[in-house]
Amino acid sequence: MCIAVPAEIIEIKEGNIALVDFGGLKQEIRIDLVDVVIGDFVLVHVGFAIQKLNRDEALETRELFRQCYEEMGQEAFPA
């Protein structure tokens, strides 16, 4: 099963690389497949932004992930 996780673009670097925030966890990803600006939300799969999301969808999905991990007794995105 493959899962894409929503993240917010917080910095765009040279070479189609962006720094994103998954809700506490920051990571660099590739943005070759989407046209984004700082503040956009994207779905990230295996290090690539594969689709833009609207902010409400992204935050709702992030909350669902958090609830699932909470039920399992784990942090969704440990620091």
Image: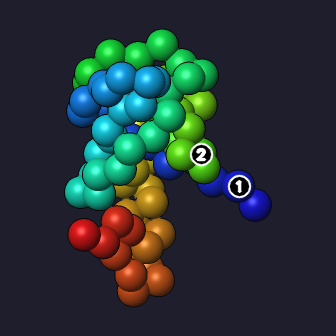
Q: Is residue 53 visible?
A: no
In the rendered image, the vertical position of residue 30 relative to residue 38, given as above or below: below
Q: Which of the pair 55/8 is nearer the observer?
A: 8
Residue 23 on image: x %, y %: 28, 52
Residue 30 on image: x %, y %: 50, 34
Query: Can you tell which of label 1 and label 2 is closer to the viewer?
Result: 2
In the rendered image, the vertical position of residue 62 relative to residue 7, given as above or below: below
In the rendered image, the vertical position of residue 34 relative to residue 77, given as above or below: above
Query: Callout 1: few (<14), some (14-19), or many (20+) C-alpha neighbours within 10 Å?
Result: few
Query: Callout 2: few (<14), some (14-19), or many (20+) C-alpha neighbours within 10 Å?
Result: some
Amino acid bearing label 2: His
Which of the labelled discs sits on residue 45, or is there none?
Answer: 2
Which of the labelled discs sits on residue 2, or is there none?
Answer: 1
The furthest residue to the right: 1
Picture quadrant where residue 32 is located: top right
Residue 29 falls left or right of residue 50: left
Determine whether the residue tagged by mark 1 lies in a helix, strand or loop: loop
Task: Tell whether label 2 touches label 1 (CB within 8 Å).
Answer: yes
Q: Quadrant of the C terminus?
A: bottom left
**Image point (41%, 31%), residue name:** 17
Which of the labelled discs sits on residue 36, or is there none?
Answer: none
Q: Which of the pair 75/63 is nearer the observer?
A: 75
Residue 68 falls left or right of residue 40: right
